[in-house]
Image (tube, rainbow, N blue to C red):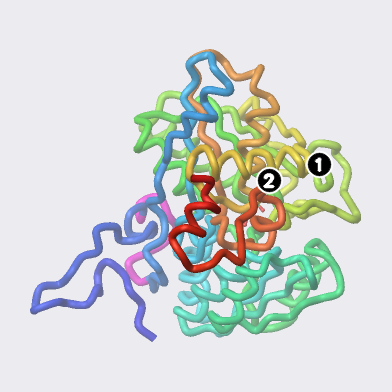
Amino acid sequence: MVTVSATNFPAVNGTPERPSWPGLIEAYRQYLPVTQTTPVVTLLEGNTPLIPVPAIAQIIGKQVRVFVKYDGLNPTGSFKDRGMTMAISKAKEAGAKAVICASTGNTSAAAAAYARRGGMRAFVLIPDGYVALGKLAQALLYGAEVLAIKGNFDQALEIVREMAQSYPVTLVNSVNPYRLEGQKTAAFEIVEVLGNAPDWLCIPVGNAGNITAYWMGFCQYHQDGKCDRLPRMMGFQASGASPLVTGKVVTNPETLATAIRIGNPANWEKAIATQQASLGQFAAVTDEEILDAYRMLASQEGIFCEPASAASVAGLLKVKDQVPPGATVVCVLTGNGLKDPDTAIKHCQNSFKQGIEPEVAAVAQAMGF
Ligand SMILES: *Cc1c(COP(=O)(O)O)cnc(C)c1O
């Protein structure tokens, strides 16, 4: 297998091409636990856009600035790629032949893509019937060995944690510390674009790996003098799966935002520590509020994210009275809307006219002219 990195990008006409963006390990090497001999397995992930969302800012008013960090534009369509380039590179460095994860979908897609690129087997355990279609399609086509269990994510995670202790497979869920190391680079990118940390960071929370990783990233850049403040970390969960809000494990989590359908977050203590250190907050949003934000992002801002991602914007709108005037707010959009076409079509509140005769007159009539 060929590992593409900035250093071995294929030469064109004798001139070694360098990609305009070398992937996040090369870009942030000095901040990551890699050495010159770590085999970098990359799909040139990271460097995703920070997009202003003026319609949402207008709803809040008070001259706030709101941006979305659109991490659905990573190579497999979610922020999981940031963690996976690190986890898989380190697994390869350690000589692993196979990796395993439990997944609500995006982790399995990312693990499959990076593991296969690195020449490893990828085993993924998913909750039967609760994985969005696009994610399952990805895992299968990337060549993962997909095992659907008659249980939920939390049960799948317990199983893979045990498997990784007894069998020659490396665990690449967000309890793997390299995942968080890779994911913290999203905070670096935000600081670089804004010239400082935002006042608020709004983020959907499932296993709470990402909120922990962002906080690590902001703190590291703050220590390094790259920003002179730290954001309040605002974590949003779906109301049917909100253990960090209620303080209690949820045995049967329910939400249409399947990526955050988690009742017992793997990074529970780290999430609480992040909330406390940042003077942040956890709050719950209903599926209806998630869908409203999901439709608004698409139809008002032109941004198609997956339902779980829209929880960050739904949460911001829910607590908008608390936003300080003039604040800069970043909402993390964790995954691409194309992951879950079923939910989009079912909940779009839009329809299209079918069965129209293939004639200009008929089309014009259907258009209301
Ligand atoms: C994994 C995932 C989340 C949750 O991230 P955690 O690190 O588990 O809190 C949110 N949204 C999407 C789209 C995801 O794939």
Tell me the quarter of the picture where residue 342 sits. bottom right
Q: CA distance from mark 2 to mark 1?
A: 11 Å
Say whether residue 225 is visible: no
- Indicate yes or no whether the magenta region holds residue 287: no
Q: Amino acid at mark 1?
A: Ser
- Where does residue 36 sit, x and y in percent of width and height? 32, 67
- Where does residue 124 sit, x and y in percent of width and height? 67, 76
Above or below: residue 180 compared with residue 11:
above
- Where does residue 64 sit, x and y in percent of width and height? 49, 20
Q: Which residue is mark 2?
A: 205
Give left or right: position of 121 versus 286: left
Reading the chain from its start, which is encountered first: label 2 or label 1? 2
- Indicate yes or no whether the magenta region holds residue 36: yes
Mark 2 crowdedness (10 Å alpha carbons): few <14, some 14-19, many ≥20: many
Stretch of the chain drawn in magenta: 29-37
Q: Amino acid at mark 2?
A: Val
Quadrant of the image for the N terminus? bottom left
Q: Which mark's residue is nearer the viewer, 2 or 1?
A: 1
Secondary structure of the residue carrying numbered label 2 = loop
Mark identifier at residue 79: none
Q: Residue sitting at 61 percent across and 44 percent down?
A: 212
Above or below: residue 104 compared with residue 269:
below
Look at the numbered disc 2 and say if its residue's Cβ is closer than 8 Å to ligand 1: yes
Main SS type for the magenta part? loop
- Where does residue 258 sit, x and y in percent of width and height? 73, 57
Q: Which residue is mark 1?
A: 239
Give left or right: position of 306 versus 164: left
Mark 1 crowdedness (10 Å alpha carbons): few <14, some 14-19, many ≥20: some
Give left or right: position of 187 versus 305: left
Secondary structure of the residue carrying numbered label 1 = helix
Residue furthest out toward the front: 361
